[in-house]
Image (tube, grey):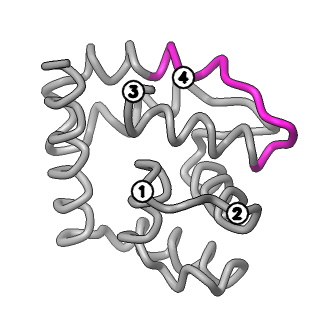
Amino acid sequence: MKHTFVFAFLMVVAIGTVKANFSDDMKALFEACSANFPNFQGDIVKLFKIEMGMEPADDASKCYIKCIMEKEGTFVNGTFNMDEFIKIHKEHPVLKDHLDEVIERAKNCSALKGVNDCDAAYKIGTCLSHRH
């Protein structure tokens, strides 16, 4: 339970850090996906709530998560890209100090499958955000 709380706290801090300090690349990623999914309009709070299971996920939200993961290189051809995920998180200002836990979580989540690519990306993204 302690690890779940610590990881959830780190994710909240990470989201807050990302929200406050979006790089130009991240802004472009969210804007590109928002163009395809206008319900989000780059709403990272809504995305966070969906990934944490606080809001229901419809097909559009699942595909929005897939879009983000594809554009960042962590979901390629329907498969989770562990190497790119590690590369991104090695450089993250908050999560890099907890890389072992992040990688362990990613290993556990990477095997999840869905009824389609959007569903698979959603399940992996949700798993990465919290423990079931």
Q: Residues within 10 Å of mark 3 (few under 14, many from 20)?
A: some
Q: Of the residues under marks 3 and 4, which one precedes in the sequence?
A: 4
Q: Position of residue 101 (x, y in %)?
A: 27, 17
Answer with the quarter of the image where residue 105 lies: top left
**Label at residue 109:** 4
Of badges 3 and 4, nearer the viewer stands: 3
Q: Of the residues under marks 1 and 3, which one precedes in the sequence?
A: 1
Amino acid type, residue under disc 4 in the picture: Cys
How far apart are the two marked residues, 1 and 3, measured between alpha carbons? Answer: 14 Å
**59 to the left or right of 18:** right
> Which residue, as the protein is rendered here, is positioned at the far right?
115
Circle 4 SS class: helix
- Residue identified by numbered label 1: 54
Answer with the quarter of the image where residue 18 lies: bottom left
**Label at residue 131:** 3
- Residue identified by numbered label 2: 58
How far apart are the two marked residues, 1 and 2, measured between alpha carbons? Answer: 13 Å
Who's the residue at 86% across and 37% down the image?
Answer: 115
